[in-house]
Image (cartoon, rainbow, N blue to C red):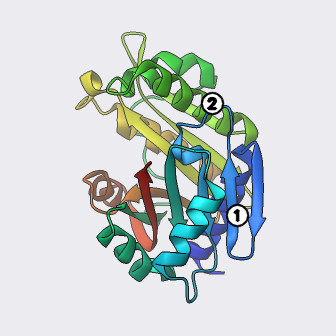
Amino acid sequence: MQPYERAWEFDRDLQERGARRVQRFDRGAALYNDSLPRVYDGNFVRIDDADGLGADEAERLANALQGELRHRKLVLPATAEGLAEELAARGWSRTRIATLEYRGEREPPAKGTAEIVDARAIRGAREAALADRDDDLTRQIAEYTERLAAANDGRIFAAFDRGEPGAFCALYERDGVGAIDEVTTIGRFRGRGLGNAVVNAALRTSLAGGAGLTFLNADADDWPKQWYERLGFVEVGRRYEVWRTI
């Protein structure tokens, strides 16, 4: 199995473990976290087989499977670029998600200091990173990320500045694969190397644990992708996320 396919398989398992409810259908699965309805990442329809799927049918699936939600979100595989663009032309928002495999040094040098912490210890930092959302949405997103970490035995790395957590990320490991997720630096702590510290700590931990594949996902059109590439990550594939508010 190629790196992108392994990463896609890992992400599917990660998402389903973090869901409260999974409804399967012939083309994929719908994931739900009913108590957190505003979290798009926790309530979406994943299309595994997009062969021959057109925009009309995709919209019907989203409406049928997410009828009680105030949003529609589809996660589409690498083969569905055309469908993603067609839905974007109909007014859906579209993000291209790049999967990047680490191909740098097998023993990368330490960069800064980071430590493993309890997920709840950085709740304040998570909320600070979401300061542009309203209080209810901030609470739901923070609760979902903690739920995802707990359901997948995730390890949370944090880097501190004068006792305050300034950056953090999660590492998920299973069956020789390590996934680095939720890489976040609080705005007022940027430029101090804290983001480098947490990513590097998670990366070193994954490699030391014997992972044959360590990867992360990033917006293909945003600046962090170039930063990850400088750290030794290489793009191996893309998927697509499309969504709209009802």
Residue 201 - label? none
Instruction: Please state the horizontal and vertical placement of residue 103, each as a whole percent of the image.
Output: 46, 67
Instruction: Please state the horizontal and vertical placement of residue 42, each as a whole percent of the image.
Output: 60, 45
Q: Is residue 204 visible?
A: no
Instruction: Please state the horizontal and vertical placement of residue 206, each as a whole percent of the image.
Output: 61, 50
In the image, residue 245 sits, relative to residue 38, either above or below, namely below
Residue at figure coordinates x 75%, y 42% from the top left: 20
Q: Decide if residue 224 is on the left or right side of residue 145.
A: left
Mark 1 surroundings: few (<14), some (14-19) or many (≥20) residues within 10 A: some
Residue at figure coordinates x 45%, y 36% from the top left: 198
Asked if the residue at tag 1 contacts the one at tag 2, i.e. Cβ–Cβ closer than 8 Å, the answer is no
**Amino acid on which disc 2 is placed:** Glu
Q: Decide if residue 24 is on the left or right side of residue 76.
A: right
Q: Is residue 9 visible?
A: yes
Image quarter where the N terminus lies is bottom right
- In the image, 88 versus 118, the foreground residue is 88
In the image, residue 121 sits, relative to residue 115, either above or below, namely above
Residue at figure coordinates x 64%, y 61% from the top left: 64
Residue 29 - label? 1
Helix, strand or loop status at disc 1:
strand
Residue tagged 2 = 146
